[in-house]
Image (spheres, helix red, strand yellow):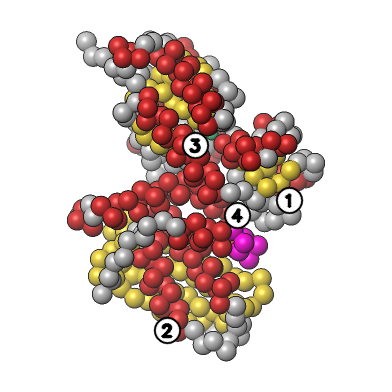
Amino acid sequence: MSVERVIFHVDMDAFFVSVEEIFDPTLKGKPVVVGGLAHERGVVAAASYEVRKFGVHSAMPLRHAYRLCPQAVFIPGHPDRYRSYSRQVRAVLDDFSPQVKMASIDEAYLDMTGSKRLLGPPLNVANSLHETIKEKIRLPCSIGIGTSRLVAKIASDMAKPNGILSVLPGAEDRFLAPLDVARIPGVGKVSQENLCKYGIHKIGQLTRLQEEHLRSIWGKAGVSLVAKSRGLDVDMWSSPGMSVPDKPKSISHETTFRDDTTKQDLIDATLVKLVQLVGRRLRGYGLHGRTIQLKLRYADFKTITRARTLIRSTQLDTVILASIRELFSQNWNEDKAIRLLGVQIGSLETTSGQLDWIDDPRDRKWKQALEATDAVRNRFGESSIGLASAMKNAHQERVHENTVDVPERKLE
Ligand SMILES: [Mg+2]
């Protein structure tokens, strides 16, 4: 007989808001929005439970949130604080299981299989984990317990806020069947609407469908959806919805300044931000790029693009940035104001075949640091689109990142 897996999903409650409350306890119990000021162009990164009552939720434009709840406190946010608290949470989790997988900055999966003899029944362990996080870090979280990551994640979601929910082995179907399909990780609005067209609203309806039927409609994604509806772990880390997007040929970001500029620090902060955006997407796809291209448009609309090719492909911000800065300093005519800047990375290849490069311990360390911060940027990223207004944040980010031990690497 195989051993039942015991998986915990630990998810911090309104993480960014809770961290802000530690620094300013007067925020407690108030409607709070983290992500930017009310008039800014970005989106909500986190919403307190009080403000959610007004219909505010993350990823919503800040101005929309303001319309729904003008009395809310709007905070631009402190990514450095969130990263530091995330590390503290991680340290506590490590005390409870040798197998911790951070899924983002504020959630993690713990494999607790086999911990019973050492620590006791899972529910008791979850209780003491919950207490420890509250006492040591002063942050609330919710914990889901299940035989798969999928069930554990859905359980923690339903336990929110500040709760624990355990789905006993064998009870998965009964637990999942009455839930909306949107509860399945990876099923977003579009997928939900697609399923709705076929009259599928609840997870239980999916379970009853023939795999072949779903395969004929949605191919592989349909098959994995059926597996998920049964509480099984399939492509949990990569499923974006009903369709898997093709890998891109190149990745680029560009921004137009609100006012044409010759200001060195603004220009450099913008290049940093653009590189971060490109790097984040590159890593999101698991790709490395070799060709790095700068696009520069002057106030008179004259546009130049300049590229260079690296000897080895990279997915590191530091490496991309070094090339971009060099291309920029070589090509900018300092008398002329800049209207637009763009960064592109091309000649993309998958990670495989790059093992020597990945396995350099210094790179690995830096890569892990980036992956952790990517999780923050996945939430904050959208606000970076309004770059001109986000410049203050760009400077903050740089200050933070310069403290990280950046490996030196010769490119040529
Ligand atoms: Mg959370």
Say which element carries label 3: loop
**Quick check: is 65 in the magenta stretch?**
no
Say which element carries label 1: loop
Provide the residue designation for mark 1. 38
Within 8 Å of ligand 1, the CB of disc 4?
A: no
Within 8 Å of ligand 1, the CB of disc 3?
A: yes
Q: Quadrant of residue 150?
A: top left
Question: Marks 1 and 3, Cα distance to the nearest angstrom?
Answer: 24 Å
Mark 2 or mark 4, which has the lower sequence index?
Answer: 2
Specify the amino acid type for callout 2: Gln
Kindly identify the residue that appears in the image at 25 percent across and 66 percent down.
Answer: 312
- In contact (CB < 8 Å): disc 2 and disc 4: no
- Position of residue 231 measured from the top left corner of the image (x, y, whole percent): 40, 22
Specify the amino acid type for callout 4: Ser
Query: What span is colored magenta in the figure?
Result: 388-393
Question: Marks 2 and 4, Cα distance to the nearest angstrom?
Answer: 30 Å
Say which mark, if any, is on residue 383: 4
Question: Marks 2 and 3, Cα distance to the nearest angstrom?
Answer: 41 Å
Say which mark, if any, is on residue 106: 3
Kindly identify the residue that appears in the image at 30 percent across and 73 percent down.
Answer: 309
Kindly identify the residue that appears in the image at 44 percent across and 40 percent down.
Answer: 87
Question: Marks 1 and 4, Cα distance to the nearest angstrom?
Answer: 12 Å
Mark 3 or mark 4, which has the lower sequence index?
Answer: 3
Say which element carries label 4: helix
**Quick check: is 389 in the magenta stretch?**
yes
